[in-house]
Image (cartoon, grey):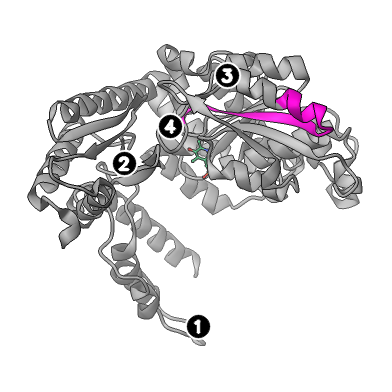
Amino acid sequence: MDSEAFRQWSLKAAEWGVDYRDGLRERPVRPQVEPGQVLASIAASPPEAAEPMEAIFADFEAKIVPGMTHWQHPRFFAYFPANAAPVSVVAEYLVSAMAAQCMLWQTSPAATELETRVVDWMRQALGLPEAFAGVIQDSASSATLAAVLTMRERALDWQGNKSGLSDAPRIRVYCSDQVHTSIDRAIWIAGIGEDNLVRIPTGGRFRAMSPEALESAIVEDRKNGLLPAGIIACVGGTSVGGTDDVAAVVEVAKRHGLYVHVDAAWAGSAMICPEFRHFWAGVEGADSVVFNPHKWLGAQFDCSIQFIRDPESLVRTLAIRPEFLKTHGRDGITNYSEWSVPLGRRFRALKLWFLLRAHGLEGLRTMIRNHVGWSQGLAQRLGREADFEITSEPMLSLFSFRHAPAGVDDLDRHNLALVEAINRDGRIYLTQTRLDGRAVIRFQAGQFETTEADVDQAFEVIVALARAEGEPAAN
Ligand SMILES: *Cc1c(COP(=O)(O)O)cnc(C)c1O
């Protein structure tokens, strides 16, 4: 591609992006494709000869776009949001054009220093104490893996990386029964093993783990010669927003010398609003905290911030310093690849810098407050309908419900069929979860462009489809 063509197609791509965003409300949120349909439409072998960009672009529009789930759709109410505010997309165009590897300070000083600065902006925005430094990881899964490796090494007096775990005491990590599967995988990959992830039962309105049960599990394990290493607290769990009492968890951890990692991947964004910070009261006592600006805040994927109280312990766990990576003679510089599992790193700070400046914290707070208010309004409206039941009250902008009309025996089947009917309809997109053994439907409002009218439309679609189908499973 010569420079003139690069210009032409870059402009075309940018225009396409704008039209795409403008037209999203007209598209079904979830694509109407069968498994294998896209695969079958793509040539089975790579081209030997160069093809014209016109043909490539036309195929993108004809074959790819209709098979996409539109995560930036204003009526995307499934999972959690993966917001990409337009300004963060613009920043990504620039990052993509420069295409730098930002693993060391010297491989892009500006990327490193901007990362230091915007991570600290976020620390201030969330009301975290100055003692926290931070790094932008690719995902919360990576951040949690880094935290689990750190708690393991700390518990093994930094011998695990060298000697392996075969002669080490059995390491134990504690969490609630509401945590994300990324915790399980971090435990597997760290060699600790699922059997040593101790799940403490939860209770109460926010499904918090019991600090008493947590403490007895630790004491019991110690008595049995096991090695408690750390606790993972959950703030805003993926299923229904399960939230631990972080202050109580930190207190238990302090008594037993354990590391505390807080997973607030989704809910962390809401902490820019002071009135929501009670949900993680005590967080200042944690050793690390992860939250994803790429979820609710609007920094396009991927952008996950891990705040760390003692970066030295993380660097001690993850840094390798082969000769070719050494930056001789430069003191006081940060090489962020020593803070994460992958070596190569994208320049992720730019989109966060653009986002925070273009919207200001006040703009982002307004968005989050609107989402929370609209979700709560929807939960109230649905709760007033006799055939609907709110199965978990809103945690910020997330709640769950089920349709429970009289005369339907298998409510699980009924509700799973209802979700499928709603998603096939395409005007909104929802996902289901299991709560206390029952199938329930999740709702969260969080997309950057969502309006109150979109949430009203969700009410209409849910109620109409639930009642129209009577027994949706029959179709
Ligand atoms: C989304 C989510 C994760 C995983 O985030 P990734 O960045 O996709 O790895 C972990 N924990 C919670 C609570 C989440 O909501």
Label 3: how many Cα within 10 Å (few below 14, some 14–19, many 20+): many
For label 4, the residue is: 297
Q: Is residue 278 above or below residue 396?
A: above
Q: Secondary structure at mark 2?
A: strand
For label 1, the residue is: 46
Q: CA distance from mark 4 to mark 3?
A: 22 Å
Q: Residue at x 26, y 30 (%)?
A: 390
Mark 3 is on which residue type? Answer: Val
232 within the magenta span: yes
Task: Tell me the mark number nearer the camera, choosing from 4 and 2.
Answer: 2
Q: Nearer the viewer, residue 125 or 14?
A: 125
173 within the magenta span: no
* The disc label shown at residue 323, or none: none
Mark 1 is on which residue type? Answer: Pro
Q: Nearer the viewer, residue 446 or 365?
A: 446
Q: CA distance from mark 1 to mark 3?
A: 53 Å
Regarding residue 102, the answer to whether it shows in the image is no
Among numbered discs 4 and 2, the one appearing first in the sequence: 4
Task: Tell me the mark number nearer the camera, choosing from 4 and 3.
Answer: 3
Task: Tell me the mark number nearer the camera, choosing from 2 and 1.
Answer: 2
Tell me the magenta residue range. Answer: 218-236
Q: Secondary structure at mark 4?
A: helix
Among numbered discs 4 and 1, the one appearing first in the sequence: 1
Quadrant of res 160: top right
Left or right of 102 on screen, residue 317: right
Residue 21 pos. (x, y %): 28, 48
Q: Secondary structure at mark 1?
A: loop
For label 3, the residue is: 246
Q: CA distance from mark 3 to mark 2?
A: 27 Å
Regarding residue 241, the answer to whether it shows in the image is yes
